[in-house]
């Protein structure tokens, strides 16, 4: 157990951590902060983040962000009713954004910190979206993976990712998010020193 963070000591390579929480709990904000801490510590970062796009206070879509470079592409648009071949809920997905994200994930799967944001019904039920990243996570070529999963899909994700039932799961809420940012950032930076 790491005395500074209270988080378990994980193997140097191939550790998987699930990040979960309700909508607007701050999961992506947490990942963005941990990404910055990893880069500041000199670690390599790979994978994808799904960053909300707003017009005023209204969420109008999602951009996919390359965790390595920070580059962004449109990923999904809130359409009200599903359109196009790839959709879930009220979002229609852009094939070019999905392709870019999968390319970024493939290029970054050996990074010290590998991020996949998020695995939801599109991936774990329909086999679309970031589903091609599942074998990348199972291959465990990264140092540590932080994978966002909806709470109702945790069991399914653990099976799909071949994670043991006692794997580390971090529950994020708006109240706990600042503390998790602090703890995970210190933990990741400590892995660089270790």
Image (cartoon, grey):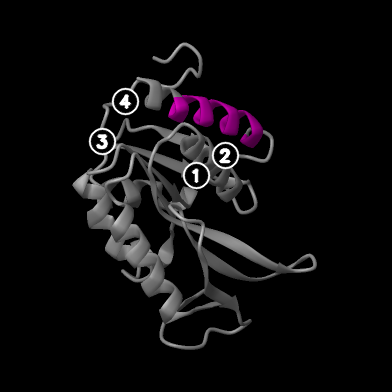
In this rendering, would 25 be left or right of 186?
Answer: right
Report the Cα–Cα distance between label 2 and label 1: 6 Å
Which secondary structure lies at badge 3? loop
Figure quadrant of residue 167:
top left
Q: Dot 4, how many residues are within 10 Å of its Cα: few (below 14), some (14-19), or many (20+)?
A: some
In this rendering, would 137 be left or right of 67?
Answer: left
Q: Mark 1 = which residue?
A: 20
Q: Residue at x 31, y 69 (%)?
A: 127
Q: Relative to residue 164, is residue 10 depicted above or below? A: above
Q: Earlier in the sequence, mark 2 or mark 1?
A: 1
Report the Cα–Cα distance between label 3 and label 4: 13 Å
Q: Position of residue 185 (x, y in %)?
A: 52, 31
Determine if residue 90 is in view: no
Q: Mark 3 = which residue?
A: 164
Question: As rendered, which of 23 and 51 lies closer to the eye?
Answer: 51
- Residue 79 shown in magenta: no
Q: Earlier in the sequence, mark 3 or mark 4?
A: 4
Q: Earlier in the sequence, mark 1 or mark 3?
A: 1
Q: Earlier in the sequence, mark 2 or mark 3?
A: 3
Q: Mark 2 = which residue?
A: 172
Q: Which residues are magenta?
A: 177-189
Report the Cα–Cα distance between label 1 and label 3: 16 Å
Question: Does the magenta stretch mainly form a helix, a strand or a loop?
Answer: helix
């Amino acid at each position: 157990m790491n005395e500074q963070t209270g988080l378990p000591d994980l193997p140097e390579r191939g550790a998987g951590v699930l990040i979960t929480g309700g909508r607007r709990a701050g999961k992506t904000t947490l990942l963005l902060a941990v990404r910055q801490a990893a880069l500041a510590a000199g670690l390599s970062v790979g994978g994808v983040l799904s960053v909300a796009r707003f017009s005023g206070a209204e969420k109008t879509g999602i951009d996919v962000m390359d965790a390595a470079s920070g580059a962004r592409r449109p990923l999904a648009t809130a359409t009200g009713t599903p359109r196009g071949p790839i959709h879930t809920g009220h979002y229609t997905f852009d094939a070019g954004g999905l392709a870019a994200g999968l390319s970024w994930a493939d290029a970054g799967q050996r990074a010290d910190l590998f991020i996949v944001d998020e695995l939801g019904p599109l991936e774990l039920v329909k086999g679309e979206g970031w589903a091609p990243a599942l074998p990348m996570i199972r291959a465990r070529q990264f140092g540590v993976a932080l994978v966002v999963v909806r709470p109702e899909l945790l069991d399914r994700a653990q099976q799909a990712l071949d994670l043991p039932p006692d794997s580390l799961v971090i529950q994020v809420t708006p109240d706990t998010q600042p503390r998790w940012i602090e703890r995970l950032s210190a933990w990741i930076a400590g892995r660089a020193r270790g």
